[in-house]
Amino acid sequence: MAGEFSGKVAAITGAGRGIGDAIALRLLDEGAKVFSFDLNAPDEPRDGVTYLTLDVGNPGSVADAFRRIDQDAGQIDVLVNNAGVQRVALAENMPIEDWHLVINTHLTGMHLCCAEAIRRMRARGRGGAIVSIASAAGIVAVPGRGPYSAAKAGIESLTRVYAVETAEAKIRVNAVAPGSTRTKLIDEGLRNGSIRGEWQIERIPMGRLAEPWEIADPVVYLASDRASYITGQTLVVDGGWTVQGMVHIADWLKPAPPAE
């Protein structure tokens, strides 16, 4: 895989930490020129990444960032829509401001960045790849996370629409839907009590959370030429969470422990 993205330019939203940072490192290792779009400063700046401060839900801010890529790199080959925020409350208690923030960051942010990237990829005539971060929460119900789940389901839908709209231009549009991953969003949930670690582990057949690099690798694969005939798809990377039909399994249905 060495140099698989040599000569290519990638933009990643929310690349200052967590999954976005892991994706940036993978693309850097493969030779890409990487731009980060983030409202916050990076936790640990990476040599080789150009960090741009912007609000992905603001059309003017996004347009300015892509103009910066035009000036500095002259092309865009890969877009990864990863930026996200979380607000937790039951429907009747969810402040409308929080609803708008979550939808705007995840869903509107994806649309705005896709529109800018697609316009440039189409004009250049050499195709491109877009990968957006959806979520297992867009597939199964996670109480208290209405706007987050709705936005993530919307990302899957837009992925299919934009894949069909751009296929003739050799632009591939896919998504990755992570399950519970060790990120700051999870850490915040553990702190505020909206998540309990043992509940998550109990519901994941593989018995653990994902590490950010385990989400980054599928993203990089879908952005690469090795996925040249894949478009409009969502790859679920959740340790089996969304296919687990029963939370509790009778002892006699569990596999025997390995012999020591």
Image (tube, helix red, strand yellow):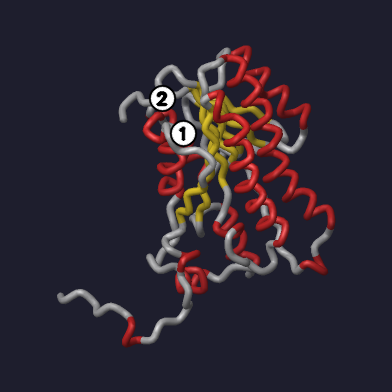
Q: Position of residue 90 (x, y in %)?
A: 75, 69
- Compared to residue 14, the image places residue 7 above or below, namely above
**Relative to residue 102, is residue 29 drawn left or right?**
left
- Of badges 1 and 2, the one in the foreground is 1
Furthest residue toward right: 96
- Compared to residue 114, the image places residue 235 above or below, namely below
- Viewer-side residue, 230 vs 155: 230
Q: Earlier in the sequence, mark 1 or mark 2?
A: 2
Quickly name the residue at label 1: 223
- Viewer-side residue, 200 vs 191: 200
- Please name the residue shown 16% across and 76% down the image: 259
- Please name the residue shown 55% across and 36% down the image: 173
Amino acid at pointer 2: Phe
Quickly name the residue at label 2: 5
Q: Position of residue 42 (x, y in %)?
A: 58, 37
Amino acid at pointer 1: Ala
Circle 1 Cα neighbour tier, 10 Å, few/some/many (<14 / 14–19 / ≥20)? many
**Relative to residue 32, is residue 143 drawn left or right?**
right
Circle 1: element type: helix
Picture quarter with the N terminus: top left
Q: Position of residue 154 (x, y in %)?
A: 67, 49
- Please name the residue shown 51% across and 18% down the image: 126
Q: Position of residue 115 (x, y in %)?
A: 68, 29
